[in-house]
Amino acid sequence: MKVQNIKNIDKFFEVVDACKGRVELVTGEGDRLNLKSKLSQYVSMANIFSNGVIPELEILAYEPEDINKLVTFMMEND
């Protein structure tokens, strides 16, 4: 799923951390980084973070309840 305009990055990672299954960031090169890993969170955000807003990410979540959590976050934090 593509997510856009994440303004509250701390809350985004709280939602990711609350997910039960894997949540992965898909890079422009097609690599997949485990967003539940703190190291991956720091590395991935250092590469794409600009002006306090993440403009667009492609993420994969494998559990239906995790997808719902992420969709709810995007709808509530628009």
Image (spheres, helix red, strand yellow):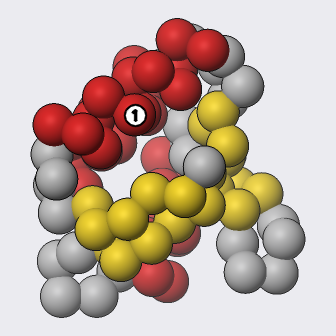
Please identify the quarter of the rendering in which residue 32 is found.
Answer: bottom right
Q: Is residue 47 above or below residue 4?
A: below
Percent across and percent down for residue 8 are 16, 55
Tell me the residue at 16%/53% (across/down): 78
Residue ID at (54%, 37%): 36
Image point (67%, 43%), residue name: 60
SS category of the residue bearing label 1: helix
Residue 40 screen position, x and y as percent: 57, 56
Residue furthest bottom as drawn: 51
Closer-to-camera residue (30/2):
2
- Which of 74 and 20 lies nearest the eye of the viewer? 74
Residue for point 17% across, 77% down: 52
Q: Can residue 47 be seen from the camera position used here?
A: yes
Pick the residue in front: 71 or 21. Answer: 71
Label 1 crowd bin: few (<14), some (14–19), many (20+), radius 10 Å = some
Q: Residue 54 location, x and y as percent?
A: 33, 73
